[in-house]
Image (cartoon, grey):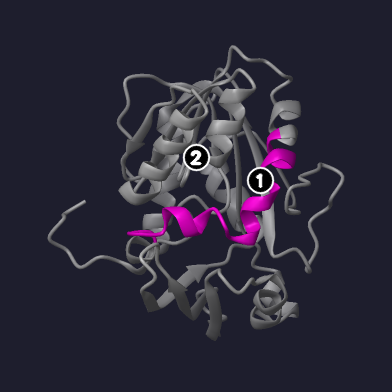
């Protein structure tokens, strides 16, 4: 990424937010989410895992503590500094690398990719840039692989208020989100996010996030050679294949698998 370009909202939000991030309500589900990941992987600790948009390392640290081999990448050096500190405090050696998820360049290919709590996708400015993340993650994986991620459920804002959801989900010390408009043509929510950084300075950002329909996600992943794509409702700390995706699920949980002989495609 050209460092001379004006920073986007998702960069500014995480510039100095590593400590405050770990106080957000959505971080409370880490243990249960890792329980689910372990079950999905068959408790196979020989698998190599790439945690995309790892943030402060909450999933990477917990999975490493359980004996898994995890590498974390994130665009925010501030988030990664917090991740490295927590790993050090726990006596864990985890590679946390500052890297743009749209252009992943690592010395190894992975068996599994995680991209939880959005992990960069779907925060990009265009659909093409969001797809670049999926494409780049796909290239970083071995031919036979699994990709587990969460993303915003496009069915939710068709039936429910985004502002009502955030009002019930917020805590005083966390970021506050106020939806201004939801564009039915692009499925982008334009919102104002107010937060206080780790230095106690308050900021207000104009943001926009892309909500995806399950059929869109299925098509994008099939484009990349994933043959089995399962989509469920994403419940905080309680991911389950028993939770059929519904209109009241703010996020969807995607579990995609690619077999050994699949041919990858990298164009929309």
Task: Tell me, yes or no, whether the highlighted magenta stretch contains residue 27.
Answer: yes
Residue 267 appears in the figure = no
Identify the residue at horizontal 70%, vertical 75% (top origin).
165
Q: Quadrant of residue 261?
A: top right
Could you say which is closer to the camera, residue 34 or residue 256?
A: 34
Q: Position of residue 65 (x, y in %)?
A: 60, 24
Q: Residues within 10 Å of mark 2 (few under 14, many from 20)?
A: many
Q: Earlier in the sequence, mark 2 or mark 1?
A: 2
| Closer to viewer: mark 2 or mark 1 | 2
Residue topped by disc 1: 254
Magenta stretch prevailing secondary structure: helix
Q: Position of residue 228 (x, y in %)?
A: 68, 35
Reply above or below: 96 against 125: above
Task: Tell me, yes or no, whether the highlighted magenta stretch contains residue 238.
Answer: no
Q: Position of residue 253 (x, y in %)?
A: 68, 49
Identify the residue at horizontal 41%, vertical 31% (top origin).
139
Residue stretch rendered in magenta on the structure: 14-34
Identify the residue at horizontal 49%, vertical 50% (top origin).
119
Looking at the image, the residue that sits furthest to the bottom is 180
Q: Is residue 183 left or right of residue 163?
A: left
Image disc number at residue 57: 2
Q: Residues within 10 Å of mark 1 (few under 14, many from 20)?
A: many
């Amino acid at each position: 990424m050209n460092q001379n370009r004006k920073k986007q909202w998702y960069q500014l939000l995480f510039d100095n937010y590593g400590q405050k991030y770990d106080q957000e309500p959505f971080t409370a589900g880490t243990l249960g989410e890792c329980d689910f990941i372990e079950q999905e992987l068959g408790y196979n600790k020989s698998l190599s895992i790439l945690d995309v948009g790892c943030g402060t390392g909450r999933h990477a640290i917990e999975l490493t503590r359980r004996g898994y081999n995890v590498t974390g990448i994130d665009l925010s050096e501030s988030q990664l500094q917090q991740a490295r500190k927590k790993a050090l405090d726990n006596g864990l050696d985890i590679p946390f690398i500052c890297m743009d998820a749209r252009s992943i360049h690592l010395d190894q290919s992975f068996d599994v990719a995680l991209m939880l709590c959005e992990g960069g996708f779907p925060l990009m400015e265009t659909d093409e840039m969001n797809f670049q993340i999926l494409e780049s993650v796909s290239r970083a994986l071995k031919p036979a692989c699994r990709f587990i991620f969460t993303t915003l459920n496009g069915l939710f804002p068709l039936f429910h208020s985004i502002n009502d959801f955030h009002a019930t989900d917020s805590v005083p010390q966390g970021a506050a989100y106020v939806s201004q408009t939801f564009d039915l043509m692009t499925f982008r929510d334009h919102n104002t996010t107010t937060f206080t950084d780790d230095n106690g300075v308050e900021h207000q950002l104009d943001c926009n996030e892309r909500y995806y329909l399950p059929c869109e996600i299925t098509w994008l992943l099939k484009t990349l050679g994933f043959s089995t794509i399962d989509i469920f409702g994403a419940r905080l700390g309680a991911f389950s294949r028993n939770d059929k995706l519904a209109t009241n699920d703010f996020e969807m949980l995607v579990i995609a698998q690619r077999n050994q002989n699949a041919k990858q495609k990298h164009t929309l």
